[in-house]
Image (cartoon, rainbow, N blue to C red):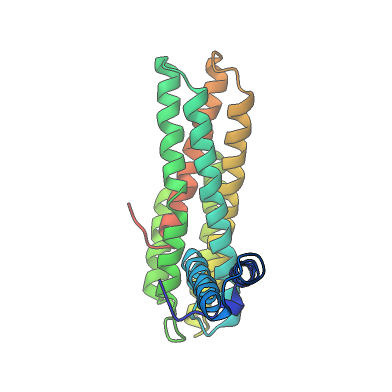
Amino acid sequence: MKWLVNPLHYPIAVLIGGLVLIVGVRLGGLPSYLIIPISSAIALGGAAVRQSQLPEPLMIENPALAKELESVRNTAQGVAEKAEVLREEADRALSDTSLQLDLLTQVQYACDRAQELPTQIETLARKFQGSDSLLSISELEDQLADIQTKLSQSSGASYQQLQSLQESLQRNIRLAKQGEDARQAQVISLNTSIQNLAGVLQQLQNKLRSADLADVQQVTELQNLSEELNSLQENVDILTHQQS
């Protein structure tokens, strides 16, 4: 926690400290020389706690890149929170039949992977600190090779998502070869993947809430959505260099 914090940046902490001061002086009858240090300490302590709860500011000199990363970080946090809710719903909804236990395991794994997103984004953001941390062409080409390997083994919706990601990476490589900062394009590709992931997560939650779990076909649909969620998470792994 950082203790050198300006409480004026955290108005709720200042408000609480002010209330303590007013109550102590007017209602408690305490002397000002005693209550002022107490209220100040409360305001400072509250501000320090609040600061520790907030993500570290992004120290990136490229404003457009910092903005994109902040957007991705917020989206990732939202997806992680939704994944936790879905995991709890799945625990309640799925009983102990063998078919549902298999589904529960798949949903739990997909949710656990989705909850890793904020950490992955923070790791990427740290890598992008400063102005001289441009993506290397070799890194981008490694990512493209991974995507192309997955493309040869995919079909349907997963194939389409991978094809779109492949095009994004090819564009990023062209930018890097032109000497431009390809990090922003990389983060935009990542944002697209996480947005797609959020959409599938919502579909999975909606389906789980309405599905007849005695119907094998509907259970299969839920399993397919869980697999699609995992596939999208693998795409995020490639873009953030978090190979598993």
Nearer to the camera, 147 or 67: 67
Residue that appears at 43% across and 68% down: 124
Q: Is residue 244 above or below residue 61?
A: above
Count of number-bearing discs: 0
Q: Is residue 212 above or below residue 163?
A: above
Q: Is residue 118 above or below residue 88?
A: below
Residue 153 appears in view:
no
Given the current orientation, which residue lies at the most extreme left position?
A: 244
Q: Position of residue 150 (x, y in %)?
A: 42, 49
Nearer to the camera, 69 or 173: 69
Q: Give the quarter of the figure containing the N terminus.
A: bottom left
Nearer to the camera, 16 or 191: 16
Q: Position of residue 21 (x, y in %)?
A: 61, 72
Residue 177 appears in view:
yes
Horizontally, is 224 left or right of 20 in the view?
Answer: left
Nearer to the camera, 148 or 204: 204
Residue that appears at 46% across and 18% down: 95
Q: Position of residue 66 (x, y in %)?
A: 56, 76
Residue that appears at 42% across and 81% down: 133
Q: Position of residue 217 (x, y in %)?
A: 56, 19
